[in-house]
Image (cartoon, grey):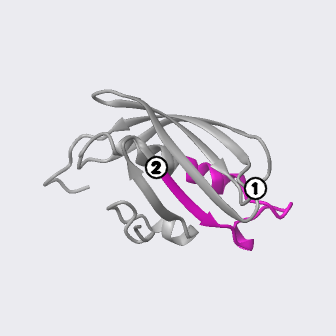
Amino acid sequence: MSSSADFFGLKVPFLKHLGVKAEMAEGGRSRISLELRPELMNSFEVSHGGVIMTMLDVAMAVAARTAHDHVGGIMTVDMSLSFIRPAKGRIVAEGRLLRGGNSLHFCEGEAFDESGELVTKALGTFKLRRETRGKAG
């Protein structure tokens, strides 16, 4: 299992700051998790929606990345999600690659709370970045 400082081979300071843990990434699937802390909650004392959105964005992008050994990485083009119920405690986000092409990848994601209940469902489109090996920026 990777630490959040080495998030499936990438350094992602924002994920480290949130406390997101990398659990699994292979075969078009990924799983990440987070122990919810007070500073990540909204006024209803449940997970802030932005935390779950971030987790699903990352889980889907990671799932898409498993389809290629691409040094340029991947970027979110579009993402939509539906919040189904509030989340408390440990949150697990899972991503799954639905279809990948030469540049665009279509994914779905689901987030679950500590009781295993589905809290959010997402769909996303991701684009492979051009290779940047040897270039600054």
Q: Position of residue 79 (x, y in %)?
A: 56, 36
The 10 Å Cα crowd at callout 1, few under 14, some 14 to 19, many 20 or more, is many
Q: Is residue 95 left or right of residue 9?
A: right
Quadrant including the C terminus: bottom left
Front residue (pair 92, 61): 92
- Estimate the x, y position of residue 120 in percent, counting from the top left: 69, 43
Establish if 18 lies above or below 111.
below
In the picture, residue 40 is in which quadrant?
Answer: bottom right
Look at 37% across and 68% down and name the residue there. 6
Residue 119: where, in percent of width, then height? 72, 47
| Element carrying mark 2 | strand
Instruction: Check residue 102 in the rendering and tell me which mark sits there, or answer none.
Output: none
The magenta-colored residue range is: 31-56
Nearest-to-viewer mark from 1 and 2:
2
Crowding near the residue tagged with mark 2, few <14, some 14–19, many ≥20 C-alpha atoms within 10 Å? many
At x 13% / y 54%, what residue is drawn? 134
Q: Secondary structure at mark 1?
A: loop
Do the residues under discs 1 and 2 have CB atoms within 8 angstroms? no
Q: Quadrant of the N terminus?
A: bottom left
Q: Name the N-terminal-most of marks 1 and 2.
A: 2
Left or right: where 46 falls relative to 70: right
Q: Quadrant of residue 136?
A: bottom left
Q: Position of residue 64 (x, y in %)?
A: 39, 40
The residue located at (71%, 71%) in the rendering is 39
Whether the magenta-drawn stretch holds residue 22 is answered as no
Which residue does the numbered mark 2 point to in the structure image?
30
Q: Amino acid at mark 2?
A: Ser
What whole-number distance in Å separates the C-alpha atoms at marks 1 and 2?
20 Å
Question: Dot 1 corresponds to which residue?
Answer: 87
Residue type marked 1: Ala
